[in-house]
Every structure is written in C-alpha cells, then in structure tokens.
Image: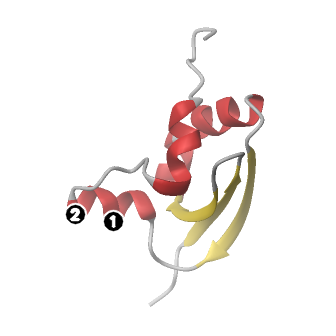
Amino acid sequence: MTQLEMRKLTIVSEHVNGSAILCERHFKEIQMNIAGARDAGVVVTVESIKRRGCRFCRSDKIGFSRWSDSMWPLWRFKKVENGG
C-alpha cells in the first residue's frame, strides 16, 4: 500500500507548541486559517511527509473538534476572504 503525501504543520504561539498531520484536501481547506495565524504572529511551518493519519479526517470520524489543542490558533486567527 502506498502512502499518500501529507502535510505536517508545526504550530508555535505564545500559548501553543504542537504539530498536526493533515491530508492534502484538508490542508487546502485551511489555507486562509494559516495565513491569518501567520499575520497574527503565530509561527506555522509546513513540511511534506509520507505518513498516514490526517488529524481532521480522524476528528470528523469520531466526532471531536478539529480545532482543539495545537490547532486552536489557526481557528482563532482565520482570515476572511473578503478583507477581514
């Protein structure tokens, strides 16, 4: 079985230091969140990895929030497409 290319996000802010693995589909969905968090001073590094286990896919499957723990700053500082 071939492993899909995933994205590993490392998120560092005043209150958070963590990482999460996302599939390409979910990574594309949160581009505006990443941009907004970076504008607010959150350090977000992205690297491509070959590993399984998308955090958002797993959260959706079991009914937990996608935005808990280290992902919170990305939700908090989401950029609105129309200038916000």
Q: What percent of the width, then of the height, locates residue 70? A: 55, 55
The residue lying at 50 percent from left, 86 percent from top is: 2
Q: Residues within 10 Å of mark 1 (few under 14, many from 20)?
A: some
Q: Does residue 40 sit above or below 42 in this rendering?
A: above
The residue lying at 22 percent from left, 63 percent from top is: 62
In the foreground, 15 or 82 = 15
Q: What percent of the width, then of the height, locates residue 4? A: 53, 74
Disc 1 is placed on an element classified as helix
Q: Mark on residue 3?
A: none
Q: What percent of the width, then of the height, locates residue 64? A: 28, 55
The residue lying at 71 percent from left, 45 percent from top is: 14
Q: Is residue 54 left or right of residue 9?
A: left
In the foreground, 16 or 1 = 16
The residue lying at 63 percent from left, 65 percent from top is: 8
Q: Residues within 10 Å of mark 2 (few under 14, many from 20)?
A: few
In the foreground, 28 or 69 = 69
Q: Is residue 25 left or right of residue 74?
A: left
Give me the C-alpha separation between circle 2 and circle 1.
6 Å
* Residue placed under numbered mark 1 in the picture: 58
* Residue placed under numbered mark 2 in the picture: 62
Quadrant containing the C terminus in the rendered view: top right
Residue type (three-letter) at the residue carrying disc 2? Ile
Verify CB contact (< 8 Å) between mark 2 and mark 1.
yes
Disc 2 is placed on an element classified as helix
Q: What percent of the width, then of the height, locates residue 47? A: 73, 64
Q: Does residue 53 sit above or below 69 in this rendering?
A: below
